[in-house]
Amino acid sequence: MTELIETSPELIRDLSLLESIEEDPDVTQASLAGQMGVAVGTVNWHLKRLVNKGYVKVQRAQRRKLRYIITPKGVAHRARLTVNYVERNFRLYRRTREQVAALLADLRAAGHDAVRINAAQQGPEDVLDICRLTCLEQGIRLVDDPAAPELRIEGVRVSLQMGSET
């Protein structure tokens, strides 16, 4: 069985760094920081951690230029992080689809065939896409009518409000 690692923002950063270094060993800390939307110091801290754990080696390419090399141990770590990331997102996808399908069954049982999605409470874009796709597959129309029942997205949770509820 695949070893699962809890996906945290730190591990997602590690994955991003390892992928970027694999694509371009001559990448600079400044460009990594720009890609990731973090400070150069944050990138430096993560790179030092990766070096200390044996996932990355640093070689001096020129006087002030460094080259980052992913070690075999680093390649294996990146692979574990990638598998974990994909598995976690598939679990989120399946769980959200099941939740929305159950809510749409309740909607149909109450005699409705249309729903609106609460745009003011949007969670991650992926959750919104899953809601839209599930409605399409279930034959539920998406409408903008404020009197229509509402799928309310709050983070990764989705709930159904039948109209008179707030």
Image (cartoon, helix red, strand yellow):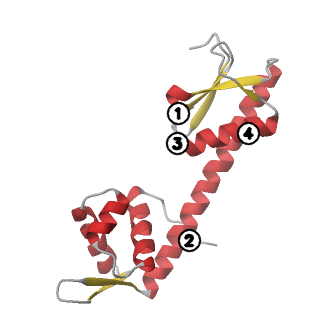
Q: Quadrant of the C terminus?
A: top right
Using the image as rendered, state which of residue 6 and residue 63 is in the foreground.
Answer: 63
Residue linked to disc 4: 134
In what element is the residue under mark 1?
loop
Q: Is residue 92 above or below residue 27?
A: above
Q: Residue at x 53, y 75 (%)?
A: 79
Residue linked to disc 1: 122
Q: Residue furthest top?
A: 164
Using the image as rendered, state which of residue 134 and residue 53 is in the foreground.
Answer: 134
Residue linked to disc 3: 124
Q: Earlier in the sequence, mark 4 or mark 3?
A: 3
Q: Amino acid at mark 4?
A: Thr
Q: Earlier in the sequence, mark 1 or mark 2?
A: 2
Residue linked to disc 2: 3
Which callout, 4 or 2, points to the residue nearer the camera?
4
Task: Tell me where residue 114 sits by quadrant.
Answer: top right
In what element is the residue under mark 2?
loop
